[in-house]
Image (cartoon, grey):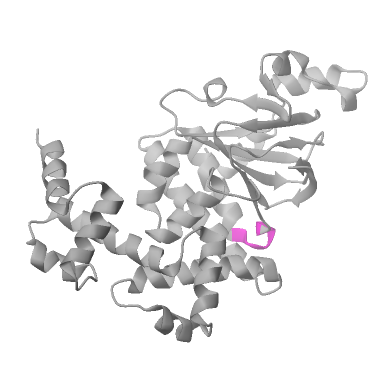
């Protein structure tokens, strides 16, 4: 599929749009049959993945129908909404949000939102992603591994404690549009390896959206704190074997108490907890994939006290390191 074919394809009228255009008052058109088939809670309807995705699908790309209002609803999947052209007026968690061409909103499974009737040129593209996608492929393929990717995933899943959506003013970043175009061409072409290619594109898209937040943060203090957190997490991830709170505070020009309080507020974990998690991740990786003796493995993970390591490992994994290694080896034996 070429770019021209893609543009023509997404602007074709759907059956619902044709039906709406026949209405005497299209602005009042309501797809009653569709909504009557949806479950409903007090805050809105529930759209379920089984209604839009095949059991084997992890990612589905679809264009939003125009000319009719989308009632307040939430999903049991993660949705990324991209404004391909025109403008989009939404109400998200009771807040009016206007997005323009190139902008992205990501909704988790608790985000209640509605969309005003779209005009001819208001093209919205939705990427539907099962939560399992973020548990497996997304985490393993993120350019930035470990706690940074966990933070991003937490931001679009149930761990998000405040708002259940993310808004990216990405209209200033042409790379986002190029990535969305590639995703759509790949999805609608359905060629060999399409699923794997889509996962790679989604990975790159999220990275580019993160850069968008970083670039915008120079003008917006609230976003600056979000970016600062990502930078802190990235530093811990790269230096967890040796870094201390005092040392890290000097690098970022912060008092140690403020730094760990900031981490706790934004991620739910303190500096020490983040460091421990990274060290234990490396320990589990070495236990699963190497035969390194325990006396040599422990220092490689940043520990200099064997008893402390055993205590922390058992608290986190529910078993001793030796049993963990044995269990993992047996599970991989044909």
Q: Is residue 220 left or right of residue 210?
A: right
**Relative image position of residue 43 (x, y in whole percent):** 73, 30
Which residue does the image show at 33% across and 64% down from the upper left? 276
Q: Is residue 27 left or right of residue 151?
A: right
The overriding secondary structure of the stretch rendered in magenta is helix
Q: Position of residue 309 (x, y in %)?
A: 22, 63
Residue in front for this viewpoint, 176 or 223:
223
Residue 172 belongs to magenta span: yes
* Camera-nearest residue between 142 and 170: 142
Where the C terminus falls, by quadrant?
top left
Q: Position of residue 318 (x, y in %)?
A: 25, 46
Q: Quadrant of residue 108?
A: top right
Position of residue 6 relative to residue 226, above or below, is above
Q: Is residue 185 left or right of residue 140?
A: right
Instruction: Give the residue drawn at x 77%, y 15%.
Output: 32
> Is 331 colored magenta in this rendering?
no
Q: Residue at x 51, y 59 (%)?
A: 267
The residue segment tinted magenta is 170-174
- Above-or-below relation of 218 to 320: below
Pick out the residue farthest to the right.
24
Answer with the quarter of the image where residue 81 lies.
Answer: top right
Q: Is residue 220 left or right of residue 279?
A: right
């Amino acid at each position: 599929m070429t770019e021209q074919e893609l543009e023509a394809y997404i602007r074709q009228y759907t059956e619902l749009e044709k039906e709406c255009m026949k209405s005497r008052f299209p602005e009042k058109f309501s797809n009653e049959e569709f909504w009557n088939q949806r479950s409903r809670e007090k805050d809105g309807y529930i759209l379920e993945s089984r209604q839009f995705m095949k059991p084997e699908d992890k990612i589905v790309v679809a264009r939003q129908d125009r000319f009719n209002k989308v009632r307040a609803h939430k999903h049991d999947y993660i949705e990324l909404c991209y404004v391909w052209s025109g403008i989009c007026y939404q109400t998200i968690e009771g807040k009016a949000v206007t997005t323009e061409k190139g902008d992205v909103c990501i909704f988790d499974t608790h985000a209640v939102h509605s969309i005003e009737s779209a005009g001819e040129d208001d093209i919205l593209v939705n990427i539907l992603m099962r939560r399992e996608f973020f548990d497996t492929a997304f985490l393993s393929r993120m350019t930035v591994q470990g706690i940074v990717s966990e933070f991003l995933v937490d931001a679009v899943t149930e761990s998000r404690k405040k708002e259940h959506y993310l808004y990216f003013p990405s209209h200033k970043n042409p790379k986002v549009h190029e990535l969305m175009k590639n995703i759509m061409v790949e999805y609608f072409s359905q060629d060999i390896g399409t699923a794997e290619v889509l996962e790679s594109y989604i990975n790159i898209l999220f990275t580019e959206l993160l850069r968008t937040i970083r670039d915008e943060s120079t003008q917006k203090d609230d976003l600056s704190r979000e970016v600062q957190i990502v930078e802190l997490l990235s530093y811990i991830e790269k230096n967890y074997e040796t870094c201390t709170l005092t040392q890290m505070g000097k690098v970022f020009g912060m008092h140690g108490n403020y730094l760990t309080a900031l981490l706790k507020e934004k991620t739910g974990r303190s500096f020490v907890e983040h460091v421990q998690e990274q060290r234990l991740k490396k320990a589990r990786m070495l236990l699963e994939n190497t035969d390194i003796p325990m006396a040599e493995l422990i220092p490689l993970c940043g520990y200099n006290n064997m008893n402390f390591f055993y205590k922390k490992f058992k608290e986190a994994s529910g078993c001793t390191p030796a049993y963990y290694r044995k269990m993992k080896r047996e599970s991989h034996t044909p």
